[in-house]
Amino acid sequence: MKFIPIAKLGLVLILIGALAGFLSPQSTSAFMATRPNMPILISRIEVLQPERFVVRVPEDYPTIQAAIDAVAEGGTVLIGPGLYKENVQITKSLRLIGVSQEQVRIQAVDDQKPGFYVTSKAPMQIYLQGLTLFREQLPDFKEPFTFIPPGAGVFILGPIQTIMRQLTITRQVSAVVIFPLAEYNEELLRFQPQAVLEEVELVRNGGAVAAVSAQVTIVRSNIAENEGGFMGDSLYLIRSTVRKNRFWGIDLRSSAYGPQYMGALNDNDISENGIGVILSTISEDAAHSWLWINGNKITRNQEYGIMILKKACPTSLPHPELALGKESAFIRIFGGGNELGENLKGDLCPADYPWPPGFRK
């Protein structure tokens, strides 16, 4: 009675063995050789390698761009010491970490394109640390532009949250440029780009930061010897140095459709610039926007320490809005304990503006 099941099992094993032999590479090739016109249904099976969450340059990939392309979404690219000559594009969330800003130097070789171009139509998070970004050659402005804005160090376009820590960015037309989505998207209309710069050196550039409809926080950083310092509509500047920028240190302007909190300047050294701080809300809709200015040292600027964009405050380089006959609507200013002095055209302008009690020491 037990013979039949055992016989069946033996038959099954014989069939499996025969099938395995038939499907071996040698037997398959021989079989197909006798049937050249037979369609091939399966030629091979590829084993896909999983995306890597940590990749290293140059150990795993020779370039930063190759490592970025290979790393998984949300992964980390670790960069070893060296000079890397490339322009980099980032289109997914990741962490890009160099061993140190002294040892990892990235030279943008295309003089028009950004050194780092970070772009996305969907929310994304980027972390950059331990890098120096520079150029040997700036764009030739007599030639047609192939990328706008040309010659940026880090260009962030879209609803992106970015942290930049321990970076040096130098010899760029603009060190950091931040823009929201270039096209209308109702779902992301209120999702502003956000950037935090901590222990960052922005030195000897055309402009240090240009930020449109973006929230920017700068902490313990140095903005020095640029043509222009920060320009944007929302800034939290904390314990930083803004010095020797040719035209202005901080140009903070509200372009909102309604009053907005423009940010805070706390415990900074804003000295030896063309103008220390320029404040404006050109749109009447943004009147009564407000900000805090506390505990800053604002001294030895070539024109004003702090100026509201008014006709009563002429500047040596005519401001575009003033040239068009526009001036700032009312801005509410809070704060106190600021050291102001030796600003050549005046510490505060207009002098009769309702500056808060105790605003200056």
Image: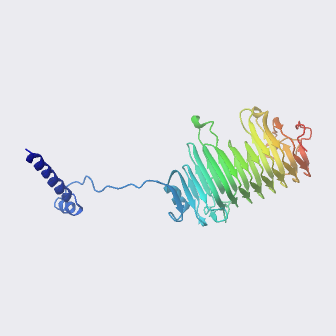
Front residue of 345/160: it is 160
Compared across the picture, whether 357 is left or right of 102 comes to right
Q: Which residue is depicted at the point 51% across and 63% down?
A: 61
In the displayed structure image, the side of residue 14 where residue 227 appears, left or right: right
Q: Position of residue 244 (x, y in %)?
A: 81, 57
Residue 317 visible in image? no
In this picture, residue 65 sits left or right of residue 226: left
Percent across and percent down for residue 225 are 78, 59
In front of the other: 334 or 287: 334
Residue 332, quarter of the rendered image? top right
Numbered-mark total: 0
Q: Is residue 213 left or right of residue 276?
A: left
Colour scheme: rainbow
Give the image location of residue 241, x and y in percent.
79, 54
Compared to residue 185, the image places residue 197 above or below, namely below
Q: At 18% from the left edge and 58% from the top edge, which residue is drawn? A: 22
Most distant residue in the front direction: 1
Placement of the N terminus among the 4 image quadrants: top left
Which residue appears farthest toward the bottom when viewing the image?
A: 82
Task: Say if residue 303 shows up in the picture.
Answer: yes
- x then y, percent, for residue 19: 18, 55
Residue pictured at 69% horizontal, 58% vertical: 169
Q: Which quadrant of the figure contains the C terminus?
A: top right
